[in-house]
Image (cartoon, rainbow, N blue to C red):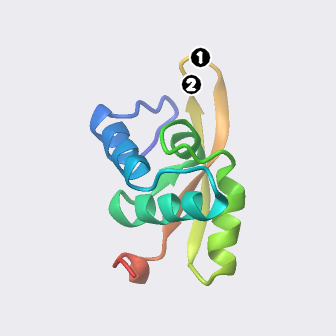
Amino acid sequence: MMGADYDIKPERIAAIEAIRQQFKGDSAATQRDRLLMILREIGPVSTFELSRFGDIYYPPSRKHELVAEGHDITTTRRVIRTESGERHSLGVYALAPGQKAAG
C-alpha cells in the first residue's frame, strides 16, 4: 500500500472523502463510525490519510476506542515522504479479516 515515497491515488482520496460525507460531524462517535467504514470499505489506511482526508482529528484515539469496543484493528508502521519532502513514520491501521462485513 505505501512505500517510502507514498503517493496517494486520487481514487483513494475520493473514496475516503465520500465516506467522510456519509458520516458528517466532528463528534468522537462520528469519527469512529468514519474510521470503521473506511477500514471496511477501503482496507488498510494510514493515520495521515485519516486526518488529512477523513477529517479524523487524532486517529490513534479513535482506533483505541474502537479496539475497546471489541474491534480487532492492527497497527503497522510505515515511513512516507510528504509533499514537503520530509520523511515521517506513521501508523497504518487494518481491520482483522473476519470483520470486513458491515455490522
Q: Please state which of residues 93 and 24 is positioned toward the viewer in this rendering.
A: 24
| Labelled disc at residue 62 | none
Circle 2 packing at 10 Å, graded few (<14), some (14-19), many (20+), is: some
Which residue is labeled 2 in the image?
Answer: 82
Res 10 quadrant in image = top left
Circle 1 packing at 10 Å, graded few (<14), some (14-19), many (20+), is: few
User: Percent x, y for residue 39?
Assistant: 44, 62
Q: Residue at x 34, y 46 (%)?
A: 18
Alpha carbon distance from label 2 to label 1: 5 Å
Q: Residue at x 42, y 58 (%)?
A: 38
Q: Residue at x 56, y 79 (%)?
A: 71
Which residue is labeled 1 in the image?
Answer: 85
Q: Amino acid at mark 2?
A: Thr
Q: Amino acid at mark 1?
A: Gly
User: Percent x, y for residue 76?
Assistant: 60, 58
Question: Relative to 28, does residue 98 appear above or below in the rendering?
Answer: below
Pointers 2 and 1 in contact (C-beta within 8 Å): yes
Locate the C terminus and report the quarter of the image it occupies.
bottom left
Image mark count: 2
Is residue 70 found left or right of 12 in the rendered image?
A: right
- Secondary structure under tag 2 reads loop
